[in-house]
Amino acid sequence: MQSYLLLALLPAVLACTNPDTNSCASFMSVNSATAGPFCTSFTNAVVTATAGLPAWATHCSNKVKEISKECSCYYTAGPNPQPTTQQPPPTTVVTSVVTATSTGSTPPVETGSCGSANQQQLVGFGVGTTGGGSGAGTTVTSCSALTSAASAGGVVRISGQLSGCGVITVRSGTSFLGVGSNSGLTGGSFRLNGVTNVIFRNLALTRPPEGRDLIDIENSTYIWIDHCDLSAAGIVGDKDFYDGLADAKRESDFITISWTKFRDHWKASLIGHSDSFSADSGNLRVTYHHNLWSNINSRTPSIRFGTAHIYSSCYENIPTSGINSRMGANVLVEQNSFVNTNLAIVTDLDSDLEGYANQRNNIFTNSPTRITRAGTWTAPYSYTLDPASCICSLVKARAGTGVISV
């Protein structure tokens, strides 16, 4: 049983969800004659599950919390309003004091200079990943050769942009390395299911098969994605035609994604299978650092249940939402630059249970946040921060393909 106090019928602006991207908000915004009376009668109402909800609640996925939020948004909140979006000045540097967790943490190295982090070093939760080892491996120039090499494992070097390879099944103990500056897949996808110890480096991956992720990680551990370029067709067309750029679900764990460009897509990186898949709790530990997120609609990342450390990265032109902590997830967000990013950090979006966010030393330029639950989690490993003031120029030059030798 949950009680939601909703208020009287005075239109208000309370950082409403974008009606262009949310069906619940869209219905509320244009159907006040229908929604208004219900919102009034819903005041002090107690509902269980979907009992007592009107037929139009399907626009809100029959989620009581979402209905409550949008009612409160479109009809002025009273003593317990929904949290409003924090709109900083056009450019804001936000610093917060962080309390270390009881498990202890290693303070980051902050040199104050740009480019101090080692581009070749594996850092974060993915440490220990060795992939297919250090041998010369096999060089492939066709989809059939790639499929065969992937099934054998070891070091697989992709030479050239391979088109239409479909879904490549990945085995444990494999490294996929791109040759030169433009090697990878167009219309292909890597699928990891129940494997461990896999590396992707220097790969340009774009436009996966319909309904697929470029890199799909399920029930897999020790994964390193580094100096890759992940993209689709832009924020155009059907948002569900392609799925994610790099997703991790179903008890996956110990992942680092570094020096990678995420660009031109609806939904970049989902961590966590669903709101009901509680087995993800205690897993899904992911480090994102020195990445460029550009022209992405949302999920940069979106994380349920798990723990994400997101540092020294650049966010530009994210119209719906940026870092989305949900279902009790914990995120530490530090030394990032957000430019034109809506809800750059948010903890009460899309799920019934909020997440936690601990943010420090970020720069927000025309980029509001909505942190309803402040976290205290800190990283248990050592790492080097590059400052937010220079991070966009740094990752634009050094993230992605053609920068390192592999």
Image (tube, rainbow, N blue to C red):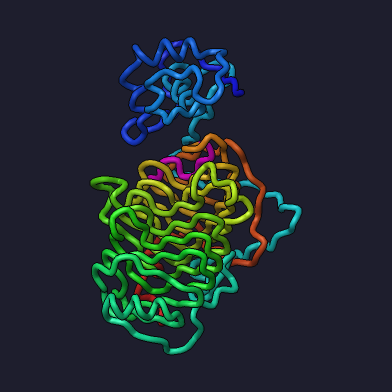
Question: Compared to 68, does 287 lie above or below?
Answer: below
Pick the front one: 199 or 150: 150
Q: Residue at x 57, y 36 (%)?
A: 372
- Left or right of residue 313: residue 242: left
Answer yes or no: is residue 317 visible: no
Residue under the point 59% across and 46% down: 278
Is residue 171 in sight in this rendering? yes
Q: Nearer the viewer, residue 240 or 355?
A: 240
Q: Position of residue 195 (x, y in %)?
A: 51, 68
Nearer-the-camera pick, 230 or 155: 155
Residue 285 locus on image (x, y percent): 58, 58
Q: Quadrant of residue 5?
A: top right
* Quadrant of the image containing the N terminus: top right
- Residue 34 drawn in magenta: no
In the rendered image, which quarter contains the C terminus?
bottom left
Would you place residue 273 above or below residue 196 in this image?
A: above
As for residue 344 lying within the magenta part, the answer is yes
Residue 123: quarter of image: bottom right
Expressed as whole percent of the image width and height from the top left, the position of residue 260 reads 41, 65
Tell me which segment is drawn in magenta: 340-348
Q: Is residue 403 above or below residue 378?
A: below
Q: Residue at x 34, y 65 (%)?
A: 167
Count of numbered circles in the view: 0
Q: Please give left or right for residue 189 compared with residue 221 in the image.
A: left
Residue 268 location in percent, x, y? 39, 53
